[in-house]
Image (cartoon, rainbow, N blue to C red):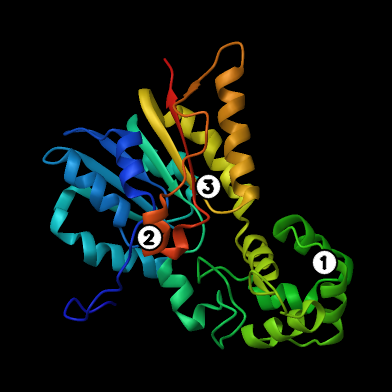
Amino acid sequence: MIALDVPLPTHVPVLVNQIIEGLEPQPGERFIDCTVGLGGHASAILERILPDGKILGIDTDPQAIELANAKLAHYGEAIILVNDNFINIEDICKQHDFHPVDGILFDLGVCSLQLDTAQRGFSFHLEAPLDMRFDTNQGLTAADLVNTLGEQELARILREYGEERHSRKIAQRIVQNRPIHTTLKLARVVKQVLGSKHARIHPATRTFMALRIAVNGELENLETALGQTINLLRPGGRLAVISYHSLEDRIVKQFMRRESSTEMPTLKLISRKVIRPTSLETKSNPRSRSAKLRIAERLS
């Protein structure tokens, strides 16, 4: 449990002003935050929908739910927190009688809590077990993939999920250096293949991203969850998704375009161009630099 007298982690929500402008929360409305994290976006929305509005916050990470509960406790019954995967969003809403809603938000990717907690194994800068699970109760870890998959399957994961051009060489070197159970050992193995001279990003960035996506089934879960949002939004309700890499953004873009361009469209694009953070935000919060926001509105 998180003691309330211990300082809670600081968290700067990404694109918060653009989210508020895009979702247009009003007093008395209901919203779903599918990746509540440390509650930054949820808090900003709650301030605009009180006194009678409510938010249903979902997160697959039990530690995030615990911290969000501590941070948002003063909102009382206006916030409902659920430790579950957003792939189950429709069932969660039925269980809590929370539909239709006025807006749904997804903030994809890894939150500061996960990156900065060494033992979670998300960072190639911190020595830790090679874990990378959002839900620490699930069985499969990154170490399981690295140490059991065949070379071809490893290469496929690195190529498809990490868009890594040197996937075959990295997969071969991983297999040659097994067992690999820690983040820094994996980072060193990748660095042996790619080097680091003149590199704009850390050489292990794409490998770590690919393994994280595979461990958590992120792309498949996103596609499934997006399809469920149509039935949950009231006419005029809005869907907002923040993504951090091209694979996520492609899924969101294709979903919104498909639903807005069929013979009987269910969505209307609010902005045809992707919304990005300002230079001021990226300077003050470097982790926002790759964020892309897309917003669509539910048609009747």
Cα distance, mark 1 to mark 3?
Answer: 29 Å
Q: Residues within 10 Å of mark 2 (few under 14, many from 20)?
A: many
Give SS at disc 1.
Answer: helix
- Could you say where residue 253 lies in the image, as x and y percent from the top left? 59, 35
Seen at 47% across and 34% down, the residue is: 229
Q: In the picture, which quadrant includes the N terminus? A: bottom left
Q: In the picture, which quadrant includes the C terminus? A: top left
Vertical arrangement, residue 199 with respect to residue 266, above or below: below
Q: In the rendered image, which residue does mark 2 sit on?
A: 37
Cα distance, mark 2 to mark 1?
Answer: 31 Å
Inspect the image, locate mark 3, and give the three-letter code of the amino acid beneath it: Ile
Q: In the rendered image, which residue does mark 1 sit on?
A: 167
Q: In the rendered image, which residue does mark 3 sit on?
A: 87
- Mark 1 and mark 3 lie on one chain; the one further toward the N terminus is 3
Q: Nearer the viewer, mark 2 or mark 3?
A: 2
Inspect the image, locate mark 1, and give the three-letter code of the amino acid beneath it: Ser
Q: Residues within 10 Å of mark 3 (few under 14, many from 20)?
A: many
- Mark 2 and mark 1 lie on one chain; the one further toward the N terminus is 2
- Mark 2 and mark 3 lie on one chain; the one further toward the N terminus is 2
Cα distance, mark 2 to mark 3?
Answer: 16 Å
Q: Is residue 30 visible?
A: yes
Give SS at disc 2.
Answer: loop
